[in-house]
Amino acid sequence: MRYDLVVFDFDGTLADSLTWFRTALSDVVEKHGLSPICAERAEALRGMTPKAIMDELGIPTWKLPFIAADVRARAAKNVAQITLFDGIAELLSELRACGVTIVVVSSNGEDAIRQVMGADLVAHISHFACGAALFGKAAVFRKVVRMAGSTPARTLCIGDEVRDIEAAREAGCGCGAVTWGFATPAILEASVPDHVYALPHDIARCVLPAAQTSQRA
């Protein structure tokens, strides 16, 4: 195996948080003094880079931690409305059964993530690094690589946003992007990640030797 450590983002990668977040979006916008976001505008944001999104919404950098903390608190109160994507449970079980170390790095809270995943899947996770700054994942990636006793070259970081790709690249790790999360496939591919995944099983095909995934093809 090329990768023996896989680092997953949570929201939009393992879990469908976006469906829930759409229901809370108007309250978040009003609380933090942002301009109204209609459905069409929200969809357009999915095709923008992080900086372009901040410029479009007029969000100053200093306000980001407050917005992130608010969203974390709301997610913690609404875990019942957040579910894992189809195929994620099977993917995590397969990776762990084949000896891959799995880590979750997220700006979301650890308690909420554990509740969404459930005890059986949490047992597959070697480490949670939660509450990460929205643009501070590179440093966290370096830390978990050291903790896992791996190297950046043997680590694959998987997320659903451009900032996940950029952080993985900054940390010297492999980067993979899933197309079922927040960002559109087009904006992800424009960032040229090492791998693009259309289905959870595509991740297993990438990480595990072909012989170990052929039976599930």
Image: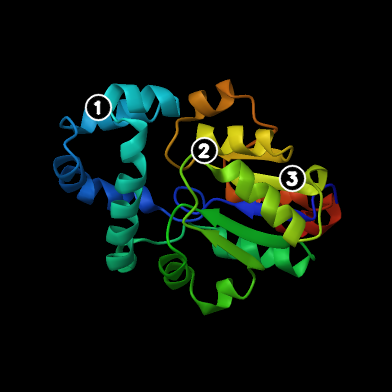
Q: Is residue 61 left or right of residue 28?
A: right
Q: Is residue 22 left or right of residue 93?
A: left
Distance Cα–Cα, label 3 vs label 1:
34 Å
User: Can I make out residue 118 in this image?
Assistant: yes
x and y, in percent, of residue 131 in the image? 46, 56
Distance Cα–Cα, label 3 vs label 2:
15 Å
User: Can I make out residue 197 in this image?
Assistant: no
Residue annotated with mark 3: 206
The type of residue carrying mark 3 is Cys
Residue annotated with mark 2: 179
Q: Is residue 125 left or right of residue 210?
A: left
x and y, in percent, of residue 94 in the image? 70, 64
Which is in the foreground here, disc 2 or disc 1? Answer: 1
Disc on the earlier residue, 2 or 1: 1
Disc on the earlier residue, 3 or 1: 1
The quarter of the displayed image where residue 81 is located: bottom left
Residue annotated with mark 1: 41
